[in-house]
Image (cartoon, rainbow, N blue to C red):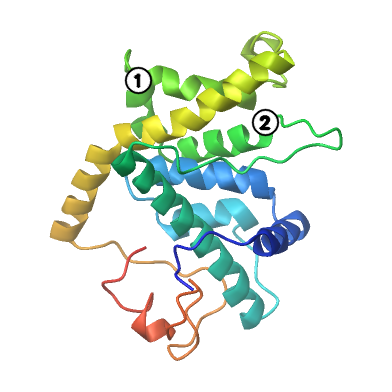
Amino acid sequence: MSFTDALSDSEVDQLAAFLANNAAMTMEELDGYFAALICSPRYISMSEYFPQILGKDFSFSSNHEAELIIGLLFRHWNAITDQLQSSIEQNDVLYLPLLYQNADGIVYGNEWASGFMHGTRMSQIDWNMLLDDENHGGSLVPMMMLAYEHHADPEMRPPPISPEKREDILALMTAGVIQIFRYFEPYRALFAQQVSMEGATPFRRVGPKIGRNDPCPCGSGKKYKACCGERRTMH
């Protein structure tokens, strides 16, 4: 199984159950959070984004649990990256936000949008350039509308959203993610070039230590020392 393979339905359920019991984010929020980080104009390291999912002081109950969950997270991250990259290369929508229905079968998208906006705050200065762009800043509006729909401050809320309007907003949100990924593509390429010239910043480990001969948690099937454990490897 490739580490870019999308999670199966059962794996999504497994990760969602873990998050429900151990994290501040739901699976839907995580999907939006990852999408924003991947769209970001600079690489966000795991040491930056991981504590936002489980908390700085979280520790796995065992190495097996750490390998399983981190492997699922890696694969979901890489699958979203691959889908977004393929979407702009093939000029087609290959990434779809992971949105859940409520008990009445209605998709609201608030949690996904909240997760996405959380991700933008990891590098707020970088995202301000998009908001200030008159031609492309509108791609972020659907996320903002759904993220702030039930904000405690009434002035932050958008006008009431009808079911028909919500469908339009969800469609615009899906297209907006791909537009944002395309918009920041030159910045990511420049950032990657700068990192390669200056050398990568040190990686700060989170969770239990993984042995060099243990299976790599990214799910590639290789030993850790021959995959993510190599200095030059960066997903």
- Position of residue 42 relative to residue 108, above or below, is below
Q: Amino acid at mark 1?
A: His
Q: Which residue is mark 2?
A: 110
Question: Residue 151 versus residue 182: which sits nearer the camera?
Answer: 182
Tell me the tag on residue 136.
1
SS category of the residue bearing label 2: helix
Residue 184 visible here: yes
SS category of the residue bearing label 1: loop
**Left or right, 68 with reference to 185:** right
Q: Can you give x and y, in whole percent of width and height, for residue 70 in the image?
A: 56, 68
Quarter placement of the C terminus: bottom left
Mark closer to the chain start, 2 or 1? 2
Q: Can you give x and y, in whole percent of width and height, for residue 46 in the image?
A: 45, 59
Q: Amino acid at mark 2?
A: Asn
Q: Residues within 10 Å of mark 2 (few under 14, many from 20)?
A: many
Q: Residues within 10 Å of mark 1 (few under 14, many from 20)?
A: some
